């Protein structure tokens, strides 16, 4: 019994969109994203500002630790 979709058994996928090229595709997308944002006039997402609950000044995240 064969698949309903006809496919040549000797076919191969080439280029950035082949199944095992996810890392290359991700690099290309990261390179083109700023260009696309500039062409469309979309501002890049900004990071949320964290304020101190006591003094209301902005805080900088140094790191995150998880209890063991």
Image (cartoon, rainbow, N blue to C red):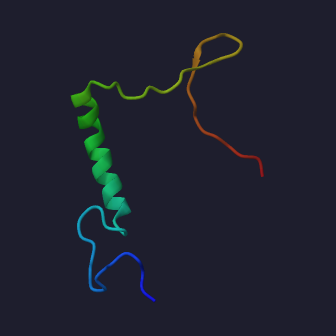
Which residue is outermost to the top? 55
State which quadrant residue 4 falls in: bottom left
State which quadrant residue 49 falls in: top right
- Total labels: the figure holds 0
Residue 15 spot, x, y in % from top left: 23, 65
Residue 59 spot, x, y in % from top left: 58, 22
60 vs 24, nearest the viewer: 24
3 vs 15, nearest the viewer: 3
Tell me: 41 left or right of 59.
left
Tell me: 27 left or right of 45.
left
47 vs 57, nearest the viewer: 47
1 lies above or below 36: below
17 lies above or below 57: below
Tell me: 26 left or right of 60.
left
Residue 62 spot, x, y in % from top left: 58, 34
Which residue is outermost to the bottom? 1
Residue 37 spot, x, y in % from top left: 29, 31
Identify the residue shown where x is 27% and y is 61%. 16
Identify the residue shown where x is 32% and y is 57%. 25
Identify the residue shown where x is 25% and y is 28%. 40
Identify the residue shown where x is 27% and y is 72%. 13
């Amino acid at each position: 019994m064969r698949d309903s979709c006809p496919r040549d058994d000797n076919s191969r996928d080439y280029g950035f969109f082949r199944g095992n090229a996810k890392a290359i595709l991700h690099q290309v997308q990261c390179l083109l994203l700023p260009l696309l944002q500039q062409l469309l006039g979309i501002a890049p997402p900004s990071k949320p500002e964290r304020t101190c609950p006591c003094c209301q000044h902005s805080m900088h995240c140094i790191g995150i630790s998880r209890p063991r």
